[in-house]
Image: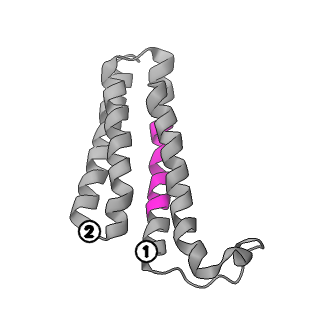
Amino acid sequence: MVLWIIAAVALHAAYVLTPAALFLPREGALKHLGGRDDLPEPGVLTGRARRALANWQESLPVFVLLALAALVLGADDRATLGAMIFVLARVAYLPLYLTGLPGPRSLAWLVAVGGLVVMALSVASFV
């Protein structure tokens, strides 16, 4: 389980850095050193990256809560399987969101939610 928590933290860095990496070349580094009050609207790709980040920020706390509960309770391998499913589906989600393909992106999101459900069922069986 610890491995998947570390993987989620690394994935968090990717989600956070992607919008900046896409936006920075357009505006240059000097614009980002200040308060960023006068930044122009993001392009399509940067907007998608920001929305993907917002979606990730909504699901990450649920994952962390379930993963920590699984560790504390000594949950079975189903919790680890659910964590693996969640993280790998969210790895796929970011590039799928950036491509703008709604079907595959939604499927990756559903698989990730399925991983959270597997984790929740595992943790609930110990409570």
Would residue 13 be seen by someone viewing this image from the given angle? yes
The answer to which image quadrant residue 79 occupies is top left
Q: Tell me which segment is drawn in magenta.
A: 52-64
Crowding around mark 1 (Cα neighbors within 10 Å: few <14, some 14 to 19, many 20+) is some
How far apart marks 2 and 1 lie (CA) works out to 12 Å
**Residue located 36% across and 26% down the image:** 80
- Is residue 61 visible to us here? no
User: Which residue is found at the position 72% from the left and 79% from the top?
Assistant: 37
Question: In the picture, which quadrant includes the C terminus?
Answer: top left
On screen, residue 97 versus residue 36, left or right, reads: left
Residue 30 point in image, percent of width and height: 74, 76
Above or below, 11 relative to 46: above
Q: Amino acid at mark 1?
A: Leu
Q: Nearer the viewer, residue 115 or 32?
A: 32
Query: Which residue occupies the foreground of this view, 31 or 63?
Result: 31
Q: Residue at x 37, y 67 (%)?
A: 98
| Residue 83 on image: x %, y % | 37, 33
In the picture of the structure, the residue carrying the numbered disc 2 is 101
For numbered disc 1, what is the local secondary structure? Answer: helix
Is residue 62 found inside the magenta-colored segment of the image?
Answer: yes
Residue located beneath label 1 in the image = 45
Give x and y (percent) for residue 59. Answer: 44, 48
Q: Main secondary structure of the magenta part?
A: helix
Residue 69 locus on image (x, y percent):
48, 25
Q: Which part of the image, by quadrant, shows the N terminus?
A: top left
> Residue at 55% across / 50% down in the picture?
13
Give the left or right position of residue 45, taking residue 19 as reference. Answer: left
Q: Residues within 10 Å of mark 2 (few under 14, many from 20)?
A: few
- Residue 84 shown in magenta: no
